[in-house]
Amino acid sequence: KVVTIMSPKGGAGKTVTTVNVGLGLAMMTGLPERVVIMDADLQFGDVCISLQVEPQHTIVDAARDIEKLDEAMLDSLLATHTSGMRVLSAPLEPSLADEVSTQVVVRTLGMLKRMFDYVIIDTAPFLDEPVLSILERSDTVLLVVDMDLPAVKNAKLALDTLKLIKFPFEKIKLILNRVNSKARLDINELERSLGLEVQAAISSDKLVPRAVNEGEPVVSLYPRSRP
């Protein structure tokens, strides 16, 4: 299964959601080696720092040897989290993102689908060609929306764009972040505006920034924390 996490606004909690979904699946299945996170935020990917993983290779290495790329080579480019979960790092510098074409992203994703049971993908906060290509190949898309008006507005614009290209909305699951914040947005009105029902809600909790700064997802650092 390919699970893609997207948000058309930076700072909405997309990467935090990605690493917790990935590690949560690894813990739940008991097969962390069958789960991989692909950091497809090609300019400012934060998956590795969020997991305290120091990658020796990135997706740029795949791009530079795309003609020779096979599953064995791709496996050698993956970092390993302490849990056993695997990680494909984004480029280490924003300037290197230009080396990673949509073709590279699509080919790499195709191989990861054959190699793993779950591919969890973090994306850039906009709808460019690589992100749209990933969405088309995803089984589930988690749309993370923060509880503020700019986040809701950007989410609506993104959904309108996906509607124009006839993207299947049944794949999209609406995830609200920081639902107990002081934003005071009406959830029913938000659902009507976006045309989606909320599938999950994440509370605002001081444990989250603490976990981020310690480089370990909440699901492993504070397994008893409230959802």
Image: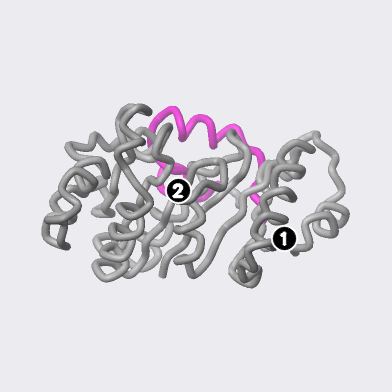
Residue stretch rendered in magenta on the structure: 200-225
Q: Secondary structure at mark 1?
A: strand
Q: Which mark is residue 2?
A: none
Q: Camera-side residue: 82 or 128?
A: 128
Q: Residues within 10 Å of mark 1 (few under 14, many from 20)?
A: some
Tell me which residue sits at (33%, 55%) in the image.
103
Residue 184: percent from the left, percent from the top? 85, 39
Q: Camera-side residue: 138 or 161?
A: 161
Of tags 2 and 1, which is closer to the observer?
2
Q: In the picture, which quadrant includes the N terminus? A: bottom left
User: Label 2, on which residue?
Assistant: 122
Looking at the picture, does residue 54 appear above or below residue 141? above
**Residue 167 shown left or right of residue 140 in the figure:** right
* Quadrant assignment, res 152: top right
Residue 3: percent from the left, percent from the top? 47, 62
User: Label 1, on which residue?
Assistant: 198
* Quadrant assignment, res 165: bottom right
* Quadrant assignment, res 85: bottom left
Q: Camera-side residue: 144 or 157?
A: 157
Q: Residues within 10 Å of mark 2 (few under 14, many from 20)?
A: many
